[in-house]
Every structure is written in C-alpha cells, then in structure tokens.
C-alpha cells in the first residue's frame, strides 16, 4: 500500500450469495464488532436485487455499496439487464467489471469490459476492473503480457483524468475460491507490472494514483502480508467477505499498515 498517493480499498464481492434478509443480519453482526474509525475505504458488492437493502443496512457503518455487474447501454430493449444510470440512482459507488466468472460463464470479452468501464464512468461511478491469468497461462510464462493486454483493452479510450476513478483488481483465476493464494511476492510483482502498464499509457503521476487490489483466497491469515506489498492497495474478497468477523479482520489488516 501507499496511502500517500492513493486510496486503500477493501471490497467484498458477495457473488450470488446472501438474500436481502441475510444482508440485514450481516450488517447487524458487523455493527456489533466494527469500530467507527477506518483508514481504508470499505465496499461491499452485492447482487443487484439486494442493493437497496444493503445501502440501508450499511449506511451507519459508512460502507460503500458496489454492484457486481452492469450492462453498457444506458437504456433500451435489453430484457433483464441493468444499466449504469439505474445503479447510480440507487447510490451505488463501485461496479465490478469483467470478473473472471463473468468472462468464463457469461461470455464477457475485453471489448464488452471496455464498454462497461465507459458506461460506469459516464454514470459517475467507479469501475473495479478485474484482470487475471489462468494456471495454464502462468505455467507457460505469459502472465505479464496477458495482464498488460487485459489492462490496455479495459482502459482503451479512457481519458487520463478519469483514471483516479478506476480500480484494477488483479485476481489470478487459479487462486479464486480455491484456497490457493498467490504468494505476496507473486501478487506484488503482477500488481507492480499493472502499474507499469498504466505508467506506459498515462505517465507516472496518473499511475501512482490508481488503486490496485489483489483478489483470490484473501483471508485474515494472509491479508497483512499481501497488503504490505507496495503496489497492492487493497483486496477484492469473495468467501471471507461473507463472514463479518473475517471481513473485519481483513479491514483491520489494511488499517494497520
Ligand atoms: P475468493 O476470495 O472466494 O477466492 O474470491 C475472490 C474473488 O473472486 C473476488 O472477486
């Protein structure tokens, strides 16, 4: 982390878990144990149908609400989709874009990811742009070029002054939900390469202002070590964000540095 130049952001990604009723219960549990003062920004990304319940439940805790997906058109005949202006109107501040599960199961491409990044920014929200390599890619030694390509595609056409609203989440696919975490050095190295890619595109001043998160089996046991890496400015947490005590432990790890 480097608080001097950029925000530290701990974000939960609940994926397709917890009902609106369970969201309320989670917030009540967290309220009992969470101190008021936090150094890092805290976000919880919830299923779209629970955004209103989450916004109400987490208001007192000063936790921002995030969405897990968005459609790139602002309105129109797209049955079942949800637009960026609709999310913004509900008070959503962050939107996860291009999560590997969406790329894998719902045919998201670098092109749709780029369109979604623009849609989120145009609606005044902050995209959390996910990138990550498969195990096969890591083993064949193409991680750096693959991640650089994903970052470049996602940011295509995004103006420099908008970069401070963008968060990049490095999530190695082989570490998601597997209990296998990248070592702090592995994760730190890729995150510093992501910053170098942004530096190449926008220059050093812009690059140092961008928050880069690590995601993939982050938990209370490994968070501090990962967050101690100079280019890891937070986490995108799946499983451990579903348990109030574990999520709080990770927030506390971010507050300690
Ligand atoms: P896990 O923390 O469950 O591995 O999930 C990571 C993730 O996909 C966050 O977006």
Image (cartoon, helix red, strand yellow):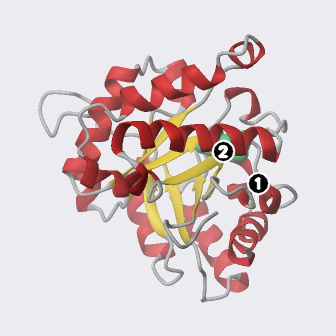
Q: Work out which quarter of the rendered image holds the N terminus and state it.
A: bottom right
Secondary structure beneath disc 1?
helix
Residue at 36% of width from left, 61% of height from top? 93
**Is residue 99 something that shows in the picture?**
yes
Q: Position of residue 169 (x, y in %)?
A: 55, 44
Q: Is residue 161 above or below residue 101?
A: below
**Tag 2 residue:** 215
Label 2 Cα neighbours within 10 Å, binned few <14 / some 14-19 / many ≥20: many
**Tag 1 residue:** 226
In the picture, measured across the screen, residue 218 lies left or right of residue 28, that is right
Find the distance from the CA under tag 1 to the CA under tag 2: 10 Å
Q: Position of residue 164 (x, y in %)?
A: 36, 57
Number of numbered discs on residues: 2
Q: Position of residue 38 (x, y in %)?
A: 60, 82
In the picture, measured across the screen, residue 22 lies left or right of residue 184, that is left
Residue at 61% of width from left, 25% of height from top? 144
Report the disc number at residue 178: none
Q: Position of residue 233 (x, y in %)?
A: 60, 59
Ligand 1 within 8 Å, label 2 CB: yes
Ligand 1 within 8 Å, label 1 CB: no
Q: Residue furthest right?
A: 221
Q: Using the rendered view, name the quadrant where residue 90 is placed.
A: bottom left
**Is residue 83 something that shows in the picture?**
no
Label 1 Cα neighbours within 10 Å, binned few <14 / some 14-19 / many ≥20: many
In the picture, measured across the screen, residue 129 lies left or right of residue 257, that is left
Q: Work out which quarter of the rendered image holds the C terminus and state it.
A: bottom right
Front label number (1 vs 2): 1
Give whichever of discs 1 and 2 has the lower sequence position. Answer: 2
Residue at 65% of width from left, 47% of height from top? 214
Q: Quadrant of ligand 1?
A: top right
């Amino acid at each position: 982390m480097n608080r001097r130049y950029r925000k530290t952001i701990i974000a939960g990604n609940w994926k397709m878990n917890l009902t609106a009723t369970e969201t309320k219960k989670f917030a009540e549990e967290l309220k009992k144990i969470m101190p008021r003062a936090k150094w890092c920004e805290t976000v919880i990304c919830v299923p779209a149908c629970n955004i209103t319940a989450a916004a109400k439940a987490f208001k007192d805790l000063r936790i921002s609400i995030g969405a897990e997906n968005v459609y790139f058109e602002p309105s129109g005949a797209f049955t079942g989709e949800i637009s960026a202006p609709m999310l913004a109107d509900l008070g959503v501040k962050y939107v996860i874009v291009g999560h590997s599960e969406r790329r894998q199961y719902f045919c998201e491409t670098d092109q749709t990811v780029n369109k979604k990044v623009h849609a989120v920014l145009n609606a005044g929200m902050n995209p959390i742009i996910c990138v990550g390599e498969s195990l096969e890619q890591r083993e064949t030694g193409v991680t750096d070029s693959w991640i650089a390509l994903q970052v470049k595609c996602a940011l295509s056409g995004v103006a420099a002054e908008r970069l401070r609203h963008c968060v990049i989440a490095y999530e190695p696919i082989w570490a998601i939900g597997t209990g296998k975490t990248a070592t702090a050095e592995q994760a730190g190295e890729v995150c510093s390469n992501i910053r170098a890619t942004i530096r190449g595109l926008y220059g050093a001043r812009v690059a140092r202002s961008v928050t880069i998160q690590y995601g993939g089996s982050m938990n209370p046991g490994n968070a501090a070590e990962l967050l101690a890496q100079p280019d890891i400015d937070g986490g995108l947490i799946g499983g451990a964000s579903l348990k109030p005590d574990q999520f709080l432990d990770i927030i506390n790890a971010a507050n300690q540095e």
